[in-house]
Image (cartoon, helix red, strand yellow):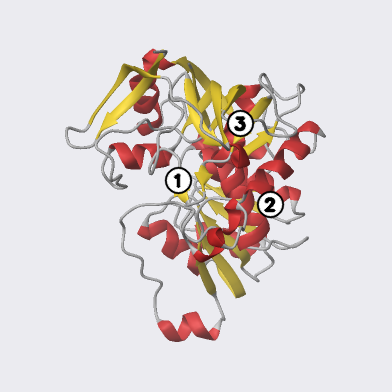
Amino acid sequence: MRTMRAARFHPASGKLGVEEVPVPRPGPGEALVKVAACGICHSDLSLLNGVFHTDLPSITPGHEAAGTIDELGSPVPGWQRGDRVVVHAGRACGACPACVSGSAIDDCERVQIMAFDYDGAWAEYVLVPVGALVRVPDSIPLERAAILADAVSTPYAAVIDTAAVRPAESVGVWGLGGIGTHALQAARLAGAAPVIGLDPLPAARERALELGADHTLDPTAEDALDRIAELTGGRGLKVAIDAVGRAGTIAQANRALGHRGRLVLVGMSMDRVELGPLAAFTRDRHSVTGHLGYRKEHIEQLVDLVAAGRLDISRSISAELPLSEIAEGVRRLEHKEGNPIRIVIRP
């Protein structure tokens, strides 16, 4: 029996450690991918600290993965061993009305999420549906391709689809870590103007300016909302994206909206959300939408954009660590050590 090293999380004890486990065998319609890199995401932290839950007694976290096909469970036209791929972190449930009718993974009504419903990719190998694979050209390093599957695709989908940002619309992004930084870049891709980044860390604000923000502000400053009004010609924001997930930042983002402004909630926590007086909220026709994840087509689009040089994520990898140092990577992200955009594991 082939074995591999994998980071295993045991929810009952809260322990995370690298263990030797069997290499999974792919069945029909499945692919075994040799992992080249996998990102460490705040969603992973939410699993480890109990905010998110899994029904499994133990699980391998990690849902931002890229690598090469090691084995196919059955012949699949267009795919072969050695192909470079990034993995959509979901699989169809197979039982909902959409699945029964033969729809694609993006249409599944109860899609299962890698690293929460089935084993993820903080491991040497990961087992995934062939339908989750997206081809990666040789021009894109696999560690950069890995973070397209969430760190880049989730904020991209929030900007392009959920917020439906249009050219010349003003956009503000609260929180300039992995999600917020890429949300800024996506807003610029969509033609937003001005693009305003908000973060209490000076280093995060400086980096955002280098990556395309028109302006950056400290959200804790007393005049933060006045400055947003000034930068938008007194009109307020058309779109506010909260990548923090805290009640205070969400309330501030809502107050920064102008008439018919759209607030998109991407950050996650257990905070209770209050948006202020209903009359003011309805008078200005604000809309608030929660956002989670992405569609496979978004990863495909991002691969094309990166390959064409339209999107630069060369600075998005803040550190690369071996699998044996997964606990250290988690610690760095949790404490924001070094102000990381994304830390990746290289099994």
Report the front residue among 343 and 339.
343
Residue 174, image x and y in percent? 51, 51
| Distance Cα–Cα, label 2 vs label 1 | 26 Å
Please, what secondary structure does the residue beneath circle 2 have? helix
Q: Which residue is drawn at 47% across and 25% down?
A: 25
Badge 3 or badge 2: first in the primary sequence: 3
The mark closer to the camera, 3 or 1, is 3
Q: Which of marks 2 and 1 is in front?
A: 1
257 lies left or right of 76 = left
Q: Earlier in the sequence, mark 3 or mark 1?
A: 3
Whether 320 is drawn above or below 182: the answer is above
Furthest-right residue in this view: 308
**In this rendering, which labeled residue sits more in front, label 3 or label 2?**
3
Q: Picture quarter containing residue 164?
A: bottom right
The residue carrying mark 3 is 74
Q: Which mark is residue 113?
A: 1
Percent position of residue 222, x then y: 44, 57
Label placed on residue 187 = 2
Q: Which amino acid does label 1 sit on?
A: Ile
Q: How crowded is mark 2: few (under 14 residues within 10 Å), some or many (20 or more)?
A: many
Q: Earlier in the sequence, mark 2 or mark 1?
A: 1
- Amino acid marked by disc 2: Ala
Q: Distance between the residues labelled 3 and 1?
A: 23 Å
Residue 322 spot, x, y in % from top left: 45, 13
User: In front: 237, or 5?
Assistant: 5
